[in-house]
Amino acid sequence: MTYTPSLKPNTRIDVADVLRGIAIGGIILIHFIEHLNFFMFPEPSSEFMATLNQGVWDTIFFLLAGKMYAIFSLLFGLSFFIQHDNQAQKGVDFRPRFLWRMVLLMLFGLFDLLFYNGDILTVYAVCGVLIVPFIRANNKVLAAATIFFALQPIEVFYIVKGLIDPTTTSLNLGSNELFKGILPAQSQGSWLDVAIMGIKNGFPVNFTWAIEHGRMTQTIFLFLLGIVIGRKRLFYDEGNNVQIWKRLLIISLCAFAVILPLYYTVPEMVDVKCVSASLEVMLKMWRNLAMMFIIVSGVVLLFYRTSARNFLIKIAPYGKMSLTNYLSQSIIGGFVFYHWGLGLYQYCGHTVSLLMGVACIALQYIFCRWWLKSHSHGPFESLWRKLTWINK
């Protein structure tokens, strides 16, 4: 298939690094209050602490859960476009290298599973392979594929099937059973026990959970949308891009205002369990998507049109080392909460765990600033980059 590369250079996008930093920071906060997929917590010491902990949990999940990963996924697709387009400008087909790059990402994900069973990198590696056929597709085909996955096709299928046959059971690939099998290793086992169960159960549970909860199809959608945004150069401050982001912010706010009450009411109005469950997943994914666009468009507008840029740019170093920060939080968090380390899951409620997550981010940020003074890439980013271009 003939591909015409961009006529303009794809320079480093600072606001993308800022957004990537915000996303990875938000992901870490969620992971820490979850005790890294180990949902075991001590009894609150008082009624006040019980109320505070519940407020922290509800607030963090409402603001960050599903939105931070969405930003991360969007930027993954953008990065793929930039890498492919830069090589196309040199007359090089990047697709074989990208496939090899996804093999490497899978290996990074398997390494992550040795410490944290909720790894997302393995899912990204598979979804990354699935979008390769679209990187050179024409705009109409790319747009059609993007819209298809945005509609949550698995949920649509089960809604239609449930309406035709009310006895249809909800999608269940066994993620709960796989997840329960990991708990003994987290609460009683050694690091080796955690590592074994991370590979044995953690690897399949991430795919089954992602499919059951609409995350897999939305990830593919966001990867494709990142390619679209890359082609349109929307993250650059050029042309009427700022006006586009302003319109997108207004549209996202309106969409959120409509979807939020639907999410809390419509599924409960449906008697067919399969249809109700699928509607809940679909509306939750769309709600998270609307919130994600509010965050992204808001940050872009603040970055390009206000003095907040001076503060936001300070987040960029943290975003540049997102892979290193993601992998290191698994090691740190596993050591802090699991039995093989400090076993602090027994003592840390949601509020304390959130503060520990903030401390982890602060330490990572200091390390990022120090490391990037003498290196152009983070440790794992540099390794991924060197291995991507091995034998060139």
Image (tube, grey):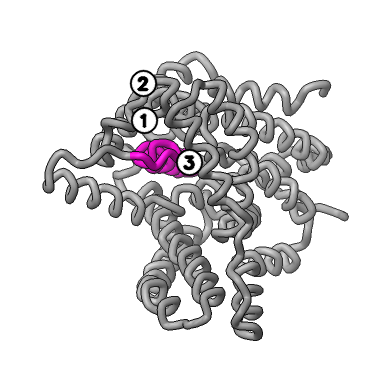
Residue identifier under label 3: 20
Q: Mark 1, mark 2: which one is toward the viewer?
A: 2
Q: Earlier in the sequence, mark 3 or mark 1?
A: 3
Q: Secondary structure at mark 2?
A: loop
Q: Is residue 197 visible?
A: yes
* Residue located 63% across and 56% down the image: 173
Q: Position of residue 196 (x, y in %)?
A: 61, 28
- Relative to 99, say whether 328 is above or below: above
- Relative to 266, say whether 303 is above or below: above
Q: Is residue 70 left or right of residue 85?
A: left
Q: Is residue 355 left or right of residue 151?
A: left
Q: Mark 3, mark 2: which one is toward the viewer?
A: 2
Q: Mark 3, mark 1: which one is toward the viewer?
A: 1
* Residue located 72% across and 34% down the image: 101
Q: Is residue 79 left or right of residue 307?
A: right
Q: Position of residue 124 (x, y in %)?
A: 63, 44
Q: Earlier in the sequence, mark 3 or mark 2?
A: 3
Q: Is residue 320 visible?
A: no
Looking at the rendering, the stretch of residues picked out in magenta corresponds to 14-40
Q: Earlier in the sequence, mark 1 or mark 2?
A: 2
Residue identifier under label 2: 342
Q: In this view, which residue lies farthest toward the top?
A: 374
Callout 2: 10 Å neighbours few (<14), some, many (20+)?
few
Task: Count how many numbered circles sit on residues in the image.
Answer: 3
Q: Main secondary structure of the magenta part?
A: helix
Q: Is residue 367 left or right of residue 60?
A: right
Callout 3: 10 Å neighbours few (<14), some, many (20+)?
many
Q: Secondary structure at mark 1?
A: helix
Residue identifier under label 1: 361
Amino acid type at circle 1 is: Ile
